[in-house]
Structure formats: structure tokens, C-alpha cells
Image (cartoon, rainbow, N blue to C red):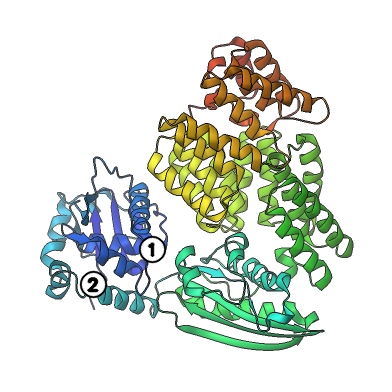
Amino acid sequence: MSASPRYAFGDFVLEPSQQRVRRRDGSALSLTPRLFDALVLLVENAGKLLDKDALMRALWPGLVVEDNSLSQVISGLRRALGDDSQDSRYIQTVPRRGFRFIAAVTELADPPAPERLPSAAIDSTSQAESTVRSVSNKRRLALVASVVMGFAGIGGWWVSRRASSVDTATPLSTLAVLPFKPLASDARDELLEVGMADSLIARLSTVPGLVVRSIGSVRRYGGAEQDPLHAARELDVAWIVDGSLQRRGDQLRVTARLLRAADGAATWSGSFDEKFTGVFDVQDAISGRVARVLAPRLEVFAGTRQPLTEIGGTRNTDAYQLYLAASRHAQQMRAESLRKSFELYHQALDIDPGYALAWVGLAETHRRTLFGADGLPSGVFGPAHAAVERALAIVPNLAEARAERAFKLYWFDYDWPGAEREFRASLAINPNVATAHFGLATLLLNQDRPDEGFAQMRTARELDPMSPVLNTLEAAYLHEAGRRDEARARLNRALDIAPTFWLAHCTLGLVHLADKQPDQAIAEMRRAVELADGTSRPSALLAVYLAHQGQSDEARKILNQLLAQERTRYLPPSSLATVYAALGDVEPALDALDRAFLTRDTRLTFMKDDPRLDSLRKEPRFVALLHKMKLDRFGPGFAPL
């Protein structure tokens, strides 16, 4: 029996049967299932123009998608391959028609070696030529015909190819768990509907090889009218768990099913009738069954299920519902909602002090006040650290707690190596923790490691694709890196998700400035000030860009307002420093930065690369502060807003 084909091109080897792409040094290239499918399609038709409509039918069979979806897939592939749309080595854009894979591709006859790939395995001019054949001479006539003759059969061919892969060992291992639908609209329990999803996500996230979208990304798909296949398309997953529930008194009826996103087929379904106190047993049963169904398709599978307490959960239904409500309030990142979140987490922990995930949630809510409510860093990280240590005393290797510990090392202790070790330790335990990917991404982008930094940022956003924060911050970093088209696409997504998110409007202002549209830019900044609740940052940014546009009188008026606020509450000195710098007040700006260091101002971690501080860079006090923080050991990086 012949081995499955493998394809060599440039610095890569593509192994479709293993759902894997490897670099010359043997390391794996991380691709989402959609990006991988697109790459296989392009490589197997190397040299041929693939029509845009046919590509969309092939990659989203049976679904209606916009051109922008295909553009994002191609952009994602180019980023992963290190390609350049202007001077492409791999993927050529044919305007208004489609795309062509232009790199030389060879089909490798021998199976891959277990160790590192030798350079000769990829070099098409080496001795390997005797064991490889050109893909263009090898492809079967039926496939060539389907590509050349208008792609009439390409959609069906690709659907068939995907279906056959699902039935074998292809690890299509991306999954989303949707909020459960109410069986009766007059007896809804919205917290329980989201809670079923949240608990299943927590359980399934610990299964090796399974990538599970976060609760934040699926929360919007609640309600009786949800369409699971539409959700699968937006979340870019191969599998969907959806279900329904009805609670009457202490009786709970739950149904659940596992759907294959490619065709909507249900590969498992089950129903449960329990007392409400047995909800955790129902969740155990559903998560265990889903994991067993997906086991043949995962790279690794742990046959034994972790007890709920080992992933930080509770078996107290009252504590559980308080936790769900607290988490929902924390997501909004507004001062009042954060205060409510604190109250609810404390109530949950009063009931069950052993609820490790509630301790982590409390710590995360403290951290969110840094940007949502001008939290005093010592007042944030003191109680946050205590909460994290309580969680780790209960579950010593709780990944979410390790991520929160890393944020303290990073944003308060200014311990760059320690923070990186802790973020990576969190991801080694559970690679589905989006906050760990995000924290590591910002650290790497600050340290002149952009390739890995943007990869980590992209992974964080893919795990939580409906997060306006992650979409906006990725857009801000892409903008700073000069990748303007990608930044706009990501920012548009953030505004689609949360049209009133102040940070997105600030970022949109920067985009308008880069486009030489100052009036629109200032208008967006003013809109951000109106939308903010509890944070002074948008006012400071507005003052900065008013000063840059020559409107110094209004900028100074805003500065005086901020100084008045500082007399009654904590206001991050780094924000004042940026306004002073924009107005040309060098000494007050440097004084503010010194105060920022004394208060452990979180935004000081980005001072090395903050363009709003450019006028201070040659000042001896600025240079000394960089040295004190040990930031001068790193090359140029990127800073968020």
C-alpha cells in the first residue's frame, strides 16, 4: 500500500494525512483547520488559478460567506508562511479573479523521518529528485479537469475530501459549546443556559489535542433562535455542541448533541432527566461522551476524565450560579459592572471557599480594573495575588491561576523572564487559556519578538473570537506594525461585536490619523470619551491628538481636568505623561513617569515603544528609567494604546 502523499515547497513540508505542516528544522507550523484546508487546496493545484467563488464554495460548503472571509484566510496563510502580498513567494493574488500557488511544489514519495527533516528533504534540486515527482505531472485527470474547466465539481470534491477525512483519523479538533437553548420560553434560566456551556468548556479544555472556544466567544449565541451552523462558521470550528434545557422547580431536563460543522450531521445525542442538584453529573456525562466521540480525531486523548474539583470547579449549585453571574458582569469591563462582579464572586466564595475558579475570576476582575476603572496597581495586585494563591493552594496546577500569577510578574513586578516562564507554564498545562496567550503575546511584542508575538495574539483571538478586547488590541498592534489592512479588518470585527466599546473607537481614531483624516480621528476620540466609564485613558488620548493637531488650548483644558481628578482619586501618571509630552512640557512629563514607576503603573511596561513618548527618548531621566526597568536590553517593539 503506497504512503499518503506529502508535498515540499519552499521551507515547508505539507502532510495532508497528518493534518500537519512542518518547517525545514522539523518544527510544526500552527494552522487553524480552515487555513490548513485552504493550503492543501492551493498546493494540490499549484500553478493553477483558483477562482474566488470556487474557493469559497470549497472552504465553506453550503454556506454563504463574503469575499472578506476568503481574504482573511489568504492573509492568515501568508502570515503563517512568512509571505508578502506585494512580493509573494507562495500565494499570488490575481485581481478580481482569484489566487494561484506559485511556489515550486514536489511530491515526496518516502514517508517522513521521525526526527528533524533534513534540508535535502525539502530541496527540490538535491538527490531527493530521484524519489519525487512534480505535482503537475502527478495529479489525477479528474482533479485537473475540475480545476481547469470552471471548477464545476470543486465544491463537491472538497466536501467529499473533508467528509472522508472526518471518517478517518484527521484531527479536526476545534470545538465550540453553545449556550443551551430553553425548551420553554416562559421558564428560562439564562444563567444556567450559559452555565452549561461554561462548565462543559472548562471540562473539555483539558482534553489534550482539543481546541475549545472560550465562554466569552460563545455567549452571544444564547437564546431559542440560535443557529449552530451559523455559529460554527463565525467561530471557525469543526465541531459544535448544542443542546436545550428546561428547569421546573428542582427538576432539570437536558438534551445535547455533537454536530459536525461541515455538514450539520449529529454524531452523538443524549438526553437527561435529573434533579437540579445533579447538574454537575449531567455535565460530566456530556463532556465525557463528547470527548470519547472525538477521541479518534484528536492527536492525543486522555481516557480518564478529570474530576470537577481538579479543574477548579464546585459542586454547590448556589455558588455555581453566583460565579456565572459574576463572570457575566466582569466581561463588560465597566466600573459599575466590575463592582457587581466583585460582590458576586465574594458571595460564591462565602458559600464554597474551595471554588478555585471563583478565586481566579476574582483575581481577573481585579486586573480588569486597571483598564476599566483606573485601578491603583497596588490595590489591584495585592488582593489579586492573594486570590491566585488561594486558587493554587486548592488546585496546584490550575492553568488559569498560573496565567493570573504571570500578569502580576509582568505588570506589577516588572519581572520579564519570570512572567514569560509563568505564561508558558500555564499554556503547558492547558493551551486553551486565551488570557495566557494574550499576556505572552504582549510581552513578546514588547521585546522585539514580533513573529511569535503576533502568532500568540492571533491564537488568543482565535480561542475567543468574539472578544472585542482581543480583536481591538490585535488591531492596535497590527496598526503600529504598519499592517494597516489587517488592522482595519480586525477593528471592523471588534466594532461589529461591540459598537460602543471605547477602546475600539480610540483605535479607529489612530487609523483615521494614519489615513490623514484628522477630523474623523478627533471625532472618534471624542466618541470614546463619551463611552468610557471609570477610565481616564480616552480623555488623555484625546488631549494628546488635539495637541498634535495644533489645538493646544483644548488639550491643556483636558489636562487640567485630569489633574483635578488626580487630587481626589488615583489616575495613572503614565497618561498624564503622554499629555505633557504632547504639549512640550518635558519636565512635568518626566516627573509623571517617575510617579508612574513609584506606583507600578501598568502602562509603564510599554513606555519603551509608546510613540506618544517619542519626544522624551533622548532625555537622560527617560534613559535612566528604561535602564532601571531593564527595558533597555530589548530591541524596538510595539505598544498598545
Horizontal placement of 399 versus 513: left or right? right
Residue at coordinates 51% horizontally, 66% vertically from top-left? 209
Residue 409 position in % (x across, y down): 68, 38
Give the CA separation, mark 2 to mark 1. 16 Å
**Residue 639, can we see it?**
no
Disc 2, SS = helix
Q: Are marks 2 and 1 in contact (CB under 8 Å)?
A: no
Quadrant into which the C terminus falls: top right
Q: What amino acid is found at the position of numbered circle 2 in the picture?
A: Ile
Which comes before the other along the chain, label 2 or label 1? 1
Residue at which label 2 appears: 154
Residue 340 position in % (x across, y down): 80, 54
**Residue 311, can we see it?**
yes
Residue at coordinates 64% horizontally, 24% vertically from top-left? 629
Please tell me how many numbered marks the rendered image carries.
2
Residue at which label 1 appears: 34
Q: Residue 588, relative to residue 282: is it above or below?
A: above
Horizontal placement of 89 versus 478: left or right? left
Q: What amino acid is found at the position of numbered circle 1 in the picture?
A: Arg
Residue at coordinates 44% horizontally, 80% vertically from top-left? 264
Residue 637 position in % (x across, y down): 49, 31
| Foreground pick, 366 / 501 | 501
Horizontal placement of 449 versus 376: left or right? left
